[in-house]
Image: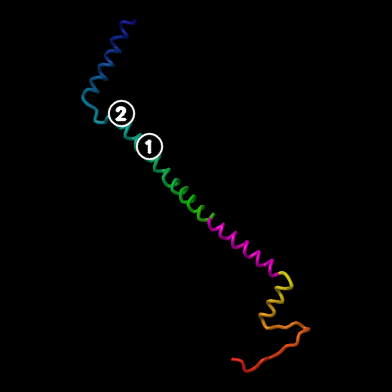
């Protein structure tokens, strides 16, 4: 049986070889490499946009940190001013700037000064 099966196998291999010898127009090994390279470029291109977005977000965060430091400094200054205006002396100083007098003081009006 082995001798009968072997000529059939050889005939099939020879027929395949004859078909392949006339020249295939498509080189599948080269086609596969080209497709693989194209897929690689598509995958790399899909990472470009998110990478740029991460860089932009990082740069924006640095600007936001600078602005936050400025606002904290301004907040500290305004808090200090607010505490200094809480006392009675500050109320009296503001009243004097507006031209008000205390109930125990005698008000005077001076005319003719230019």
Residue at 75% x, 82% y is: 102
Residue 96 image position (x, y, % from top left)? 69, 80
How far apart in space, not on screen, are marks 2 and 1 (Cα)?
A: 17 Å
Q: Is residue 114 above or below residue 98?
A: below
Q: Earlier in the sequence, mark 2 or mark 1?
A: 2
Q: Is residue 22 magenta?
A: no
Within the magenta stretch, is there residue 72? yes
For this view, does 105 lie left or right of residue 29? right
Which residue is drawn at the image coordinates 69% and 79% (left, top)? 95
Which mark, by number, is residue 29?
Answer: 2
Neighbor class of circle 1 (other Cα within 10 Å; few <14, some 14-19, many 20+) is few
Q: Name the spot of residue 60 as percent of width and height, x first.
A: 49, 54
Quick one: SS at disc 1? helix
Q: Which mark is residue 9?
A: none
SS at mark 2 in the image: helix
For the residue pair 61 and 43, the one nearer the viewer reads as: 61
Residue 98 rendering spot, x and y as whole percentages: 66, 81
Vertical position of residue 46 compared to residue 31: above or below: below
Apparent side of residue 98 relative to residue 26 in the rendered image (left or right): right
Pick whichever, 55 or 101, lies toward us.
101
Q: Residue furthest right?
A: 104
Of 33 and 11, which appears nearest the observer?
33
Locate the N terminus by quadrant: top left
Q: Residue 107's image quarter?
A: bottom right
In this rendering, position of residue 88 left or right of residue 49: right
Examine the image and state in which quarter residue 100 appears: bottom right
Q: At x 68% / y 77%, what residue is drawn?
A: 94
Total labels: the figure holds 2
Q: Residue at point 28% right, 10% down?
A: 7
The relative height of residue 106 versus residue 9 in the rendered view (above or below) is: below
- Mark 1 lies on residue: 40
Q: Magenta residues?
A: 66-85
């Amino acid at each position: 049986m082995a001798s009968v099966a072997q000529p059939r196998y050889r005939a099939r291999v020879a027929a395949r070889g004859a078909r392949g010898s006339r020249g295939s127009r498509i080189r599948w090994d080269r086609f596969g490499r080209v497709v693989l390279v194209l897929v690689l470029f598509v995958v790399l291109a899909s990472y470009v946009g998110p990478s740029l977005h991460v860089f932009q977000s990082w740069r924006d965060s640095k600007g936001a940190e600078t602005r936050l430091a400025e606002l904290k400094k301004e907040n500290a200054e305004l808090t200090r001013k607010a505490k200094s205006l809480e006392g009675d002396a500050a109320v009296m100083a503001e009243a004097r700037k507006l031209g008000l007098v205390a109930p125990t003081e005698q008000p005077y009006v001076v005319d003719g000064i230019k």
